[in-house]
Image (cartoon, rainbow, N blue to C red):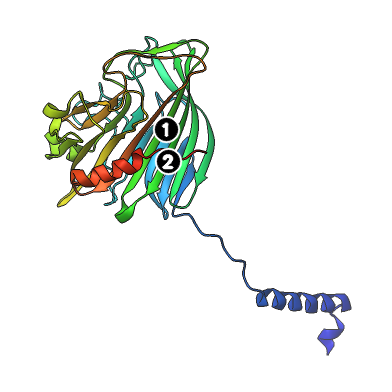
Amino acid sequence: MTILRWVPEKLVVAGLYLSLLGGAMLAQEPPEPKAVARVQVVPLPYGQAAFEREGVEMARYHFRAGLERPFLYPIVGPSGRSLTRMGHPHDPQSHSHHNSVWVSHVDVGGVDFWSDRRLGVVRHKRIVEYVDEGETSAIVAENEWVDKDAKVLLNETRRISVTLLEDKEWLLVLDLTLNAAGQAVTLGKTPFGMIGVRMAKTIGVNDGGGRIRNSEGGVNEKEILWKQARWVDYSGAIADGGLEGITLFDHPDNPNHPSHFHVRDDGWMGASLTFDSPRDIAPGTPLHLRYGLYVHREMKPPAAIETQWKRFAAPLRAK
């Protein structure tokens, strides 16, 4: 009783009110949560963003200031290991521009954007948006292709999307829109550009006993180098007893389809946009390109790869 005399009346009332309120809140049903997307884009520090499947990284986009060009690394296969690498395994200095999965060209208005000599740099401008749609996520970015004098030659919009497939396989799609900045730009005749993929060392034909195949039945560099195809696949060992690979898809809407492919037994492949002739990009007439990377387990039979290519090649839905 003595204790009650020392407790102010208002405090007792407030305590009773809070007790009743807490009980009422506990009695309420929790809010219905929204479905969590299985694949998400997660922005990271230092100019990076990761694609994650249920919290596990699949790929990472690097775009910080000071890079020669944005790139994607790693590209994680179903086993959890990266199927790509940074640089040539035996010549890292002169092939430092082999940044896993990258977009560049050796002759843009006479300027070399392919090498790391800083004659031309693909400079990140801004992230437009991150998109999560359940089974697909995307990054939309804007880049500037600038020469050594900081003159902008091309403005680029890049959409990178990841779509989940069965059995931890997945599809990465690169949609590129290139606009001339001010005056027409010519992409010179060359096998170097527009997209390159540097495979993991153990997948290479020379280092790991891997295999390159294309849609026309060719096998390895001798039969595939600079030949036209709808797709090229590079598969090999990523762990003892485990084979995985990446198929590089060329889209039918690309202006040079079926593309000539630049491939090497030393572990890289690329789609050559201007192998047979130069291409002009006039102001107000952008160049649209679409490439796909099918990340898969095992050494897929050609028929299975062709099925995935046909899905990729289907007409785009109008937005």
**Residue at mark 1 to residue at mark 2: CA–CA distance:** 8 Å
Q: Point out residue 245 in the picture as x, y percentages from the top left corner.
A: 23, 43
Q: What numbered label is drawn on residue 183?
A: none
Q: What numbered label is drawn on residue 161?
A: 2
Which quarter shows the N terminus? bottom right
Q: Residue furthest bottom?
A: 1
Q: Quadrant of residue 54?
A: bottom left
Q: Which residue is mark 1?
A: 175
Q: Amino acid at mark 1?
A: Asp
Q: Secondary structure at mark 2?
A: strand
Q: Amino acid at mark 2?
A: Ser
Mark 2 packing: few (<14 Cα in 10 Å), some, or many (20+)? many
Q: Secondary structure at mark 1?
A: strand
Q: Point out residue 10 in the picture as x, y percentages from the top left corner.
A: 87, 75
Which is nearer the eye, 226 or 126?
226
Q: Is residue 46 visible?
A: no
Q: Is residue 182 visible?
A: yes
Q: Point out residue 260 in the picture as x, y percentages from the top left corner.
A: 24, 24
Q: Is residue 303 above or below residue 94?
A: below
Which is nearer the eye, 289 or 100?
289
* Left or right: residue 97 compared with residue 88: right
Q: Earlier in the sequence, mark 1 or mark 2?
A: 2
Tell me if label 1 and label 2 are in contact, CB under 8 Å: yes
Q: Is residue 187 above or below residue 297?
A: above
